[in-house]
Amino acid sequence: MKEIYVNLKRFDIPKTYGGICPDEDPVRWIRKIVKDTAELGLGNRKDVQVTYFLPESLLVPALEELRSVPEAERSHFQIGCQGVYREDVAREGNFGAFTVNRPAAAMKALGQNWVMIGHSEERKDKLSLLSAYDSVIDQSAEKRRKAEKSVDEILNQEVRCALERNMNVLFCVGETAEQKGAGPAAEYEPRVQNVLRDQICTGLKDIGPWMEDCQIAIGYEPVWAIGPGKTPPDGEYVAFVSRYIKEVCKEEFHREFSVVYGGGLKEENAAEMAAVSTLDGGLVALTKFTPPIAFDVRSLKEIIKAYVK
């Protein structure tokens, strides 16, 4: 079964507030998105699992709408959250002093079974906090590596909190332009491999107790290729990366986790990515990348159609 994940970023913000939600009422918009997904047959395909990751304010209405859909039409359609906090509520311990944060217990109580952790935007945010404390991080390669290691360790705490609550995890990894560096493949490939190995081995450290009960997938984001005007990697590059990720997972965890491409899976590159045998699906954020940028379910259906033959 192929896995298609959709990160609906900040679709809780209408365009009048500077966001990209096309409806002045984001709650009404997400209800329609969920309804359309089911009506277009994307929720009950036996060959595809579809999971939407939503901002927290849209989770309740999305789940309510999903539960109103006949069960047969949503058997492979799930709603997930965009991260959890690195600490969690504990019985006879901290009952919830996590103001502004999102404990895994809170997400599980809402009915969340999936969480995305380590997205490139989350990594960037955590690294910026460390840089605010020590600006030398941005000027010293050694300190930068130590800071990135600290980010991986924090993400590992988040992963374990999610797994402790029996939530499935999409764990995102990927190299920046600085980490990849320039030069021919013989020069950059070892650098990319080192970055991915560090992120996987640290970010998924000590997950053994939960691997049998929880699903774990790896989302590969080539950070250097994401954004307007950037050139996405070709199938050969993604094959090199996804093959290596599976090798590392098999070596470290004695199994091959699913690997999905998160560098902007779209209709134009879906067939090329589908030809990569070590890929198990994709991570979609938008379906229209030129202004006005947007997401719509009919376009997602075309992406899936092009990816899953």
Image (cartoon, rainbow, N blue to C red):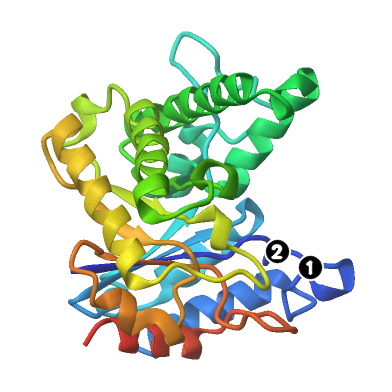
Cβ atoms under marks 1 and 2 closer than 8 Å: yes
Residue type marked 2: Asp
Q: Is residue 170 visible?
A: no
Of the numbered discs 1 and 2, the one sitting upstream in the chain is 2
**How many marks overall?**
2
Residue 179, percent from left and from top: 53, 41
Residue at left offset 19%, top offset 35%: 211
Q: Is residue 14 above or below residue 255?
A: below
Residue picked out by circle 1: 19
Q: Position of residue 204 (x, y in %)?
A: 33, 31
Residue farthest to the top? 92
Mark nearer the viewer, 1 or 2: 1
Cα separation between marks 1 and 2: 8 Å
| SS state under label 1 | loop
Screen quadrant of the C terminus: bottom left
Q: Does residue 34 appear in the picture of this structure? A: yes
- Which of the 4 image quarters holds residue 16? bottom right
- Which residue lies most toward the right here? 16
For the point 48% across and 81% down, which residue is it? 35
Instruction: Determine whether 128 is above or below 286 in the image.
Output: above
The 10 Å Cα crowd at callout 1, few under 14, some 14 to 19, many 20 or more, is few
- Disc 2: CA contacts within 10 A as few (<14), some (14-19) or many (>=20): many
Report x, y in % for residue 258: 24, 54
Q: Position of residue 215 (x, y in %)?
A: 25, 47
**Label number found at residue 100:** none
Q: What amino acid is labelled 1 in the image?
A: Gly
Is 79 situated above or below 41? Answer: above
Position of 216 relative to 162 (above/below): below
* Residue 197 quadrant: top left
Q: On residue 12, which mark appears?
A: 2
Q: Is residue 250 left or right of residue 230?
A: left
